[in-house]
Image (spheres, rainbow, N blue to C red):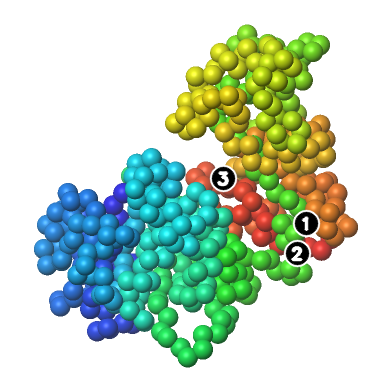
Amino acid sequence: MFTPPGLARVVCDVVTSGMGGAARRVLDPACGDGRFLEAAAEVLGPGVELVGVERDATLAEACRARVPHATVYVAESLFGMPAALRDEAFDVVVGNPPYVRSVRLKASDPELWARARGAFEATAHGEWDLYGAFIEASLGWVRPGGRVGLIVPSRWLTARWAARLRGFLAREGAVRGVVDFGAAQVFPDATTYCSVLLMERRRPVPVPVPVPVPVPVLRRTERGWERGTVDVVEAGAKPWVAGGAGSGTGTGTGTGTGLRLGDVARIAKGTGTNADPVFVLTSPRVDGDLVHADGGVTVELAATRVCWRGRDVQPGAAPRARCIVPYTDDGELVPFATLRRRWPRTAAYLLTHRARLEARERGRFAGDDFHQFGRPQNLAFHLDRAPKVIVPDVARTPRAVLDTSGALVLDTAYALRPLDGAPADWREPRALLALFESPRVLEWLARAGVPLRGDYRRLKTAFLAPMPLLRSAP
């Protein structure tokens, strides 16, 4: 995924603006075929020293051909920076670092995954992405007062895995601006929601004291480009959500009363079976103590639970599927021997799919526990029969239902329940339902979430929890 030359030039122009003759040494730590180094040469003119590092020898050779006066090393920047560069401090770092989710990196390059995991704030939590490590490391490659301009996915602004990265950048006081392209696609050969991150390494000060730092954010929306700011000191590790022009500083923590959706409700992603074609029974027909489903499947009714999928969440609708749930109501896996005695038809059915269930995640579930869900996150919460509000994980228009049946929620949907300590007006699930039936949620996500093609929005915890609320429920 190579950067369009025009975009590389704009980034180089913006990041070096006002530096004058102080921008003479430029590094691209993942230079590919040299688009950014070529752009830096065009922007900064003769005499600039260009250095590229690229782990792919073929791409490194292409970079040398594109930018003959650049010095290009074949190496891995994060852990194999050439000895000649280890003590170097560059004036500018630019580039488009690799976007590789940790789960994919573990499969394709287990050695790099093992070295990167936990080596940075950006790689210390959840299923991180390699570009986060490059964001963090880039500040160590520039001198005090040096600048960084990187094209990276915009997810780091709000993603849970990037919380420690945001906290690190807030403490460093490094971020000078963000350009968020929203749903606009900047790469012709890939669907990626991108941003440009502009940073400057802080100069040493005698006593560093965090002060409010309003970072400008320029964001592309369906209405055009909108300007806002984020007070990164106040936001810290929380999602960085920009306030609109004229609205003051966005903090990621809400406005007005300071009350947020995450303060009044628990927001839980649905459980993932990692094998829905096996566990989820479509067109179920209850017949006494049995359930008949498509494909000639017959299992015990007690082994199943009605389930919500994101596609089924429609106003006034009822769930259309049942899910085999080999767990207790407390979320404990029922041993297969016990399951076989209790529900012999269900056990026989699962055994016919044992090979498929054991093959998940390269054999992670092989053995006596082959019948477990792949991602049983929040399972006890979802199995609780208390009323809950269900929303899809992706929506174009507001969609929500109030479930009072104790249905299971699968991972294409989210469930919300009021917290015990919520203000009185927010302790009823119907108050949450009214909120999601209003346009306020999508208005907030238009500003805080990651836009998708077709005007769809993700309704995930990281985006919903910071949503500001009025003290009184709708």
Q: Amino acid at mark 1?
A: Val
Please name whichever residue, 334 or 177, is drawn nearer the observer in this view of the structure.
334
Foreground mark, 3 or 1, reads 1
Q: Residue at x 70, y 69 (%)?
A: 255
Q: Which residue is mark 3?
A: 456
Residues marked 3 and 2 touching at CB (< 8 Å): no
Q: Is residue 324 above or below residue 313?
A: above
Q: Nearer the viewer, mark 3 or mark 2?
A: 2
- Which residue is at 74% across, 17% downward? 342
- State the residue at coordinates (34%, 41%): 108
Residue matched to label 2: 259
Q: Which residue is mark 1?
A: 264
Mark 2 is on which residue type?
A: Leu
Secondary structure under the numbered disc 2 in the rendered image: loop
**Residue 182 point in image, percent of width and height:** 49, 56
Q: CA distance from mark 1 to mark 2?
A: 8 Å
Residue 52 x, y percent position in the rendering: 22, 63
Q: Earlier in the sequence, mark 1 or mark 2?
A: 2
Residue type for callout 3:
Tyr
